[in-house]
């Protein structure tokens, strides 16, 4: 009996080790399907196709209008161009794979594809938040320190700030992606999200092996909170300065340049807070899926609309671009 037991124990141990090795070296992940019924899958495909085409068209028009319109060569529109690029990148990171899975009724994504999706999503989201913070600084200087606007936001300073936003986003995405995908996975390969996202990958990792990534996330949260405090403080100063403007027309013009940015910031931050800070008691797969679509897909599609509604210069440049293209044809 004893030799039999001695032979059995290594067999069980080897089986467990092989199972951990197989799950941690999985060649693919399984994403959460948007729907179980085939009709709903096709409906989601059509919906995502419409949203992505609208986002591509709107952000593409803004990029083209700012790049080609000489009247829009100012710091505000330069940062808006960069924001449109980050919106395009973020929606092209998540939506095409979701559309492919819905159309072909599949769930899988390769290991490298998942790593690329995590890197690009963190990269574009980090860049967008940094750019929104810089755009807040642009509005603050424009309204609170107009005499120093040309000095503080010259072309070289704007280029340096935009480069810093993209570089810091690249470094953040690289650190998080490398750290997340260096963790051993012990809980299978099924993700509870329709795209690859760090919190859902951490749920698959072995216990106590993800503390290093949690430390990086904590540092990132502190930086995000610091930017949030800066945005709030800046807008307090902006509104105080606007209310001191004697003419109603001047106040209206100042508000019209700030409200689109404030709306975009509020949409971005509120969607992120709902997604990551909602109570676990109200969490459910369908609710989590709906919230993830709201914060990853809706803002990049709505941002161009928000900025173009109250900005007459941008609307005029876009209209000139469209009519000019039609006249050429």
Image (cartoon, helix red, strand yellow):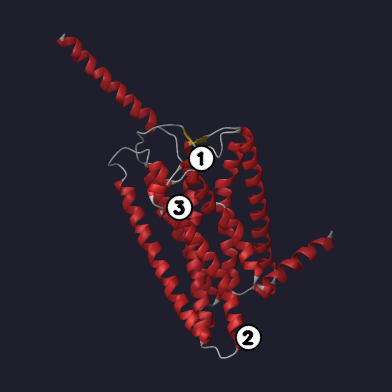
Mark 2, residue position: 249
Residue shown at the point (48%, 41%) measured from the top left: 114
Q: Circle 1 sits in a helix, a strand or a loop, which is it?
A: helix
How packed is label 3: few (under 14 Cα within 10 Å), some, or many (20 or more)? many
| Among the two numbered marks 2 and 1 on one chain, the one whose residue lies closer to the N terminus | 1
| Among the two numbered marks 1 and 3 on one chain, the one whose residue lies closer to the N terminus | 1
Q: Circle 2 sits in a helix, a strand or a loop, which is it?
A: helix
Q: Quadrant of the C terminus?
A: bottom right
| Among the two numbered marks 2 and 3 on one chain, the one whose residue lies closer to the N terminus | 2
Q: Position of residue 278 (x, y in %)?
A: 41, 53
Closest to the observer, 181 or 220: 220
Q: CA distance from mark 2 to mark 1?
A: 52 Å
Quadrant of residue 231 within the rendered picture:
bottom left
How packed is label 2: few (under 14 Cα within 10 Å), some, or many (20 or more)? few
Residue shown at the point (79%, 62%) measured from the top left: 325
Asked whether the viewer can see residue 145, the reply is: no
Name the mark nearer the viewer: 1 or 3: 3
Q: CA distance from mark 1 to mark 3?
A: 23 Å
Q: Position of residue 175 (x, y in %)?
A: 39, 51
Quadrant of residue 81 within the rendered picture:
bottom right
Name the residue furthest front: 282
């Amino acid at each position: 009996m004893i030799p039999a037991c001695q032979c059995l124990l290594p067999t069980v141990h080897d089986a467990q080790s092989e199972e951990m090795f197989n799950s941690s070296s999985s060649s693919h992940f399984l994403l959460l399907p948007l729907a179980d019924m085939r009709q709903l899958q096709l409906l989601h495909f059509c919906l995502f196709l419409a949203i992505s085409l609208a986002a591509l068209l709107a952000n593409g028009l803004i990029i083209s209008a700012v790049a080609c319109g000489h009247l829009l060569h100012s710091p505000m529109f330069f940062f808006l161009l960069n924001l449109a690029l980050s919106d395009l990148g973020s929606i092209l990171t998540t939506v095409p794979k979701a559309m492919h899975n819905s159309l072909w009724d599949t769930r899988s994504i390769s290991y490298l594809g998942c790593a690329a999706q995590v890197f690009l999503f963190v990269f574009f989201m980090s860049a967008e938040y940094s750019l929104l913070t810089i755009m807040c600084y642009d509005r603050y200087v424009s309204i609170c320190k107009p005499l120093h606007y040309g000095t503080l936001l010259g072309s070289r300073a704007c280029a340096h700030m935009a480069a810093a936003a993209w570089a810091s986003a690249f470094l953040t995405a690289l650190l998080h992606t490398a750290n997340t995908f260096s963790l051993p996975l012990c809980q299978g390969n099924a993700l509870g999200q329709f795209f690859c996202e760090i919190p859902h990958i951490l749920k698959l990792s072995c216990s106590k092996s993800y503390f290093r990534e949690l430390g990086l996330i904590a540092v990132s949260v502190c930086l995000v909170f610091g930017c949030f405090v800066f945005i709030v403080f800046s807008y307090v100063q902006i509104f105080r300065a606007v209310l001191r403007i004697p003419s109603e027309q001047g106040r209206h013009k100042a508000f019209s340049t700030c409200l689109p940015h404030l709306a975009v910031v509020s949409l971005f931050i509120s969607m992120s807070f709902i997604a990551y800070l909602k109570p676990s008691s109200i969490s459910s797969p369908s609710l989590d899926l709906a919230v993830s679509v709201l914060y990853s897909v809706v803002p990049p599609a709505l941002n161009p609309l928000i900025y173009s509604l109250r900005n007459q210069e941008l609307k005029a440049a876009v209209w000139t671009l469209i009519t000019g293209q039609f006249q050429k044809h």
